[in-house]
Image (tube, rainbow, N blue to C red):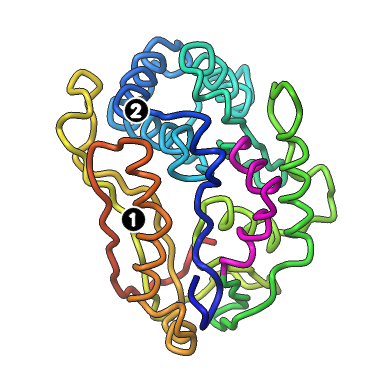
């Protein structure tokens, strides 16, 4: 923990690490084999299927808590995308037991779909570390091109608690509807996504007719890039590199907060993920890229 600011990103509870000793190469090869057989994914290119499989296995192996689906478009117009993906997850769970800890979570207002290791989330809450997702994150309120450090959205803790309660059921079946409560605002939902994706910085937009957020604002941009060894099963077409996560922080904010300076962010990301990669026997390493960018707008 860094005494000058928020604690480090939460690490996997010890009891969760003892449940499974995954071999990432085996899980990835099996997942690719399963996904290739699914008729609903026949239109998906090999490269996109590889990215999808990598992100799913990263969650299933406990390297990362969640993944926001954005790999490809679903072409089956007879079914909702969440139903198609739920069927994909069901097939993975039949063939690979590790995927039984993963559930689909659907946010209806934005139609966003998450794959979340809900058993891991439940263990965090049972071990008393459930608040670490919130306390380890710095929240930045954004209104147009103005940004300032803010408190967590008041509804965020409830969202995480409800999801953990749902994950505590004996049998996890079907998709978890995230926002049955229509009073949840977009700022809370975006902050929720950042916590699930384990970003050290979470934007909380304050919409007031603004079309562009952080336009022309210098940003510290971070990418967690997995360098993949050739041993990750040549038959499954593994990538040489895989961008596991990408996020940003306004330089004006990182200049004010010691815990958000690039050197400290890079340290936190290493402390968070390197042990998990080793535990999952990931065949490769992680590199954190830092750059400075100024954009016309930032997608929150």
Q: Mark 1 points at which residue?
A: 224
- Toward the left, the furthest residue is 230
Q: Which of 158 and 144 is in front in this view?
A: 158
Tell me the residue that label 2 is attached to. 23
Q: Are marks 1 and 2 in contact (CB under 8 Å)?
A: no
130 magenta-colored: yes
| Residue 170 picture location, percent across and down | 74, 23
The secondary structure type at the circle numbered 1 is strand
Depth check, mark 1 against mark 2: the one in front is 2
Residue 121 position, x and y percent, is: 63, 43
Query: Which quarter of the figure is the C terminus placed in?
Result: bottom right
Horizontal side of 283 relative to 98 (left or right) equals: left
- Label 1 and label 2: CA atoms lie apart by 21 Å
**Taken as a whole, is the magenta stretch helix, strand or loop?**
helix
Residue 120 versus residue 298: which sits nearer the camera?
120
Label whose residue precedes the other's in the sequence (1 or 2):
2
Query: Which of the 4 image quarters holds residue 155?
Result: bottom right
Looking at the image, which residue is at 39% across and 16% down? 42
> Which sits in the foreground, 145 or 65?
65
In terms of secondary structure, where does tag 2 sit?
loop
Residue range (magenta): 118-137
Q: In this view, does 155 lie to the left or right of 217?
A: right
Measuring 40% from the left and 14% from the top, which residue is drawn there?
34
Left or right: 238 in relation to 173 = left
- Image height of 182 relative to 260, above or below: above
Q: Is residue 264 left or right of residue 3?
A: left
């Amino acid at each position: 923990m860094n005494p000058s600011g928020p604690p480090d990103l939460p690490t996997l509870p010890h009891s969760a690490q003892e449940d499974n000793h995954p071999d990432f190469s085996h899980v990835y090869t099996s997942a690719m084999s399963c996904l290739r057989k699914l008729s609903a994914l026949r239109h998906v290119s090999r490269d996109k299927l590889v990215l999808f499989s990598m992100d799913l296995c990263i969650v299933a192996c406990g390297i990362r808590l969640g993944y926001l689906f954005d790999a490809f478009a679903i072409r089956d117009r007879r079914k909702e995308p969440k139903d198609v993906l739920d069927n994909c997850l069901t097939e993975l769970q039949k063939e690979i037991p590790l995927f039984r800890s993963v559930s689909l979570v659907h946010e209806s207002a934005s139609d966003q779909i998450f794959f979340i290791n809900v058993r891991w989330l439940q263990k965090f809450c049972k071990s008393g570390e459930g608040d670490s997702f919130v306390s380890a994150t710095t929240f930045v309120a954004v209104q147009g091109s103005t940004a300032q450090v803010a408190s967590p959205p008041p509804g965020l803790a409830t969202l995480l608690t409800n999801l953990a309660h749902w994950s505590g059921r004996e049998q996890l079946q079907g998709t978890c509807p995230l926002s049955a409560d229509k009073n949840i605002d977009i700022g809370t939902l975006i902050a929720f996504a950042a916590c699930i994706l384990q970003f050290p910085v979470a934007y909380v937009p304050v919409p007031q007719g603004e079309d562009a957020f952080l336009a022309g604002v210098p940003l510290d941009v971070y990418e967690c890039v997995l360098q993949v060894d050739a041993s990750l099963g040549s038959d499954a077409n593994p990538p040489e590199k895989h961008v596991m996560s990408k996020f940003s922080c306004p330089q004006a904010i990182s200049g004010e907060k010691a815990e958000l300076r690039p050197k400290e962010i890079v340290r936190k990301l290493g402390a968070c993920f390197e042990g998990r990669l080793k535990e999952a026997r990931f065949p490769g390493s992680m590199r954190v890229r830092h750059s400075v960018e100024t954009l016309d707008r930032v997608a929150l």
